[in-house]
Amino acid sequence: MIFETTAEDYAALIAGRGPRNFALADTPIGPPGVLQMLAEVAADVRRSFAPASWLIVEDGEAVGLCSITRPPSGGVVDIGYGVAPSRHARGIAGRAISEIVAWAMREPAVEAITAETSVANQPSERVLLRNGFSKVGERLDEQDGPLNCWRRDVA
């Protein structure tokens, strides 16, 4: 299940607390520095578009995040997502991305969703493929190395 995030949700995650009334998984969603960066990206996106990110919740635990990575342009929303390592390989990311696709299909301003994955991240690629994304290219990122580029039209 996904819930639109707030600044308070990010503050709790950064402080190592479960947001709202949710428990935390036994491994963190991400290190505090990464969570702080995601909070800043969400605040930036939220200035012109909402929702900016979602908390991924499974069985009463906050186990992941899905974020719009930059303000949408031309009807295209770019997402990134992650799940706590101890919750990998349980179908959680796939269910969350399915909910994001369903949200996008109801949003008149959204025509497509894009995402990028490391070429070595086969589980994440399977999540996207199962949710109707197609590989549309590759690129080399200075920080992240070789990436596969994905797109799902929703309009």
Image (cartoon, rainbow, N blue to C red):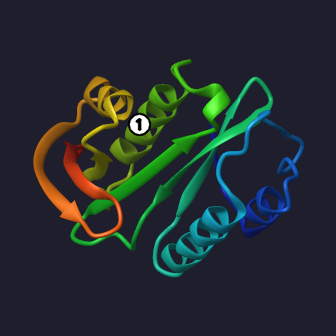
What percent of the width, then of the height, locates residue 33? 66, 68
On screen, 72 above or below 64? Answer: below
Task: Identify the residue under disc 1.
Answer: 102
Seen from the viewer's position, the closer of residues 45 and 106 is 45
Look at the image and tell me in which quarter the N terminus lies. top right
Q: Residue furthest top?
A: 90
Q: Is residue 49 left or right of residue 132?
A: right
Would residue 111 be seen by someone viewing this image from the given angle? Answer: no
Q: Secondary structure at mark 1?
A: helix
Residue 111 is drawn in which quadrant?
bottom left
What percent of the width, then of the height, locates residue 123? 38, 27
What percent of the width, then of the height, locates residue 105? 34, 42
On screen, 106 above or below 49? Answer: above
Rendered residue at 37%/47% (across/down): 104
Seen from the viewer's position, the closer of residues 104 and 23 is 23
Rendered residue at 30%/50% (across/down): 115
Seen from the viewer's position, the closer of residues 77 and 37 is 37
Q: Is residue 67 left or right of residue 36?
A: left
What percent of the width, then of the height, locates residue 61? 78, 33
Would residue 3 be seen by someone viewing this image from the given angle? Answer: yes
Rendered residue at 23%/52% (across/down): 147
Q: Residue furthest left?
A: 137
How many numbered marks, from 0 up?
1
For label 1, the crowd category at 10 Å Cα-Cα, with few meaning under 14, some 14 to 19 and many 20 or more, is: few
Disc 1 residue type (three-letter): Ala
